């Protein structure tokens, strides 16, 4: 079956016949036919639960899985967004999208030793949306289960993984890709019953540069667009949604927690690895604060908020290093010094503006949440 993508080639547009309108964007063109052209794309909103625009594995010629795929029912609570880290191609055709999907599957099966593509869905730079792991499209249409995947350690039973073709540490993705990502996130949220506040990046859970610093800066706008289509007003957004952090997590978010624990006097390495010493410190801190503990050491919202301390210009120490190392990872700051200096104040203000927070340059609870990779309600109040 030839795909019915949002962004299409000129040849496909011509096949669409009279009444279709091409709107230039990025590497492709947005095809709005009939009523969609007349109402600014609202018809896309009305069919948000229809995943027929996704090209199935059978249609793009995927290899069969190398083993039996598992499913997880009633566990899906978030979206994790990735980039492929492939070079940024200027070929936005459907053929390039298929080539990319096959390349990913070959890499995941032949090099990584996985039984299939790790991600559930893949979006090309031309805006084509393809099924990744077999069964993901059927699960999306059902909305009650997901295929167990291999896109993010610790999240493969409870998150839908979306690979986006390209490398976005120093570049931003093309509009065609962003539009299709918005559309897919709307469909996933509609089908699985959660909102735009549940869209995260790969590095919120694992030690990686994925999805790329400049792509990640697009996330507040992505969430706002998805919420708008879902009809999710700011009053329906939790005040703060922190990233789930537990023993499977690794990277900057774990290091932030470790350094905040060190600021409270706990002796442990701030290495970004959630090992036994970190687990013990988290449990001790939670019990001290009268908070519930979990076997896997989950830092829930209450734990995160108890850990945070207000820091600003002139402060120094572990809490300052906690925020600085994350700002360095996200390319807002050049280096972590342990001293809350002018560059740190500027970087924090930049982070605050990105998330719709007052640009004070000082770390309050909401700014800690946004810096950690969480989602704050203020993101959805920005025009």
Image: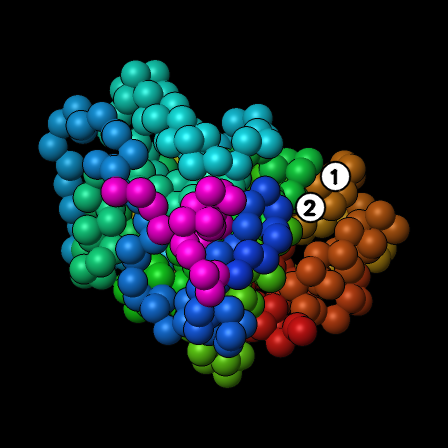
Instruction: Say which of 51 and 374 sits in front.
Output: 51
Residue 40 lies, in percent from the top left, at 54, 72
Query: Vertically, is 43 above or below 334?
Result: below
Return the residue at label 2. Answer: 327
Colour convention: rainbow
* Quadrant (top left, top right, bottom left, bottom right) of the N terminus: top left
Query: Vertically, is 359 above or below 86?
Result: below
Q: Is residue 342 among the parts visible in the rendering? A: yes
Q: Which residues are magenta?
A: 1-20
The quadrant where residue 123 appears: top left
Question: Magenta stretch containing residue 30, yes or no?
Answer: no
Query: Vertically, is 160 above or below 171?
Result: below
Asked which secondary structure carries label 1, the reply is loop
Return the residue at label 1. Answer: 336
Question: Foreground mark, 2 or 1?
Answer: 2
Q: Are marks 2 and 1 in contact (CB under 8 Å)?
A: yes
Residue 285 lies, in percent from the top left, at 46, 56
Position of 318 with respect to 57 (left or right) is: right
Q: Residues within 10 Å of mark 1 (few under 14, many from 20)?
A: some
Residue 198 lies, in percent from the top left, at 43, 61
């Amino acid at each position: 079956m030839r795909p019915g993508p949002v962004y299409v080639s000129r040849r496909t547009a011509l096949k669409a016949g009279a009444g279709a309108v091409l709107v230039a964007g990025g590497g492709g063109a947005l095809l709005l036919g009939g009523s969609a052209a007349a109402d600014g794309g609202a018809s896309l909103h009305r069919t948000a639960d229809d995943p027929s625009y996704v090209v199935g594995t059978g249609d793009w010629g995927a290899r069969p899985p190398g083993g039996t795929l598992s499913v997880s029912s009633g566990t899906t609570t978030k979206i994790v967004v990735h980039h492929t880290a492939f070079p940024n191609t200027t070929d936005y055709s459907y053929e390039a999208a298929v080539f990319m999907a096959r390349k990913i599957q070959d890499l995941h099966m032949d090099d990584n030793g996985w039984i299939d593509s790790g991600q559930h869905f893949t979006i090309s730079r031309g805006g084509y949306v393809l099924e990744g792991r077999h069964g993901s499209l059927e699960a999306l249409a059902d909305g009650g289960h997901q295929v167990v995947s291999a896109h993010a350690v610790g999240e493969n039973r409870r998150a839908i993984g979306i690979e986006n073709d390209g490398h976005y540490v120093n570049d931003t993705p093309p509009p065609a890709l962003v539009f299709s990502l918005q559309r897919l996130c709307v469909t996933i949220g509609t089908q699985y019953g959660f909102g735009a506040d549940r869209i995260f990046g790969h590095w919120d859970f694992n030690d990686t540069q994925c999805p790329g610093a400049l792509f990640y800066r697009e996330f507040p706008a992505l969430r706002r667009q998805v919420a708008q289509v879902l009809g999710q007003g700011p009053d329906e957004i939790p005040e703060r949604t922190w990233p789930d952090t537990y023993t499977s997590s690794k990277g900057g978010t774990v290091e932030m927690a470790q350094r905040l624990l060190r600021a409270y006097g706990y002796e442990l390495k701030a290495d970004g690895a959630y090992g036994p010493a970190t687990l013990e410190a988290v449990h001790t801190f939670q019990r001290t604060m009268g908070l519930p503990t979990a076997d896997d050491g989950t830092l829930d919202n209450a734990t995160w908020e108890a850990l945070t301390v207000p820091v600003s210009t002139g402060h120094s120490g572990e809490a300052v290093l906690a925020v600085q190392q994350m700002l360095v990872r996200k390319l807002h700051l050049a280096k972590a010094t342990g001293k809350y200096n002018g560059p740190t104040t500027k970087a924090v203000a930049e982070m605050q503006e990105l998330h719709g927070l007052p640009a004070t340059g000082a770390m309050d609870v909401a700014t800690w949440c946004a810096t950690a990779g969480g989602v704050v309600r203020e993101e959805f109040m920005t025009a």
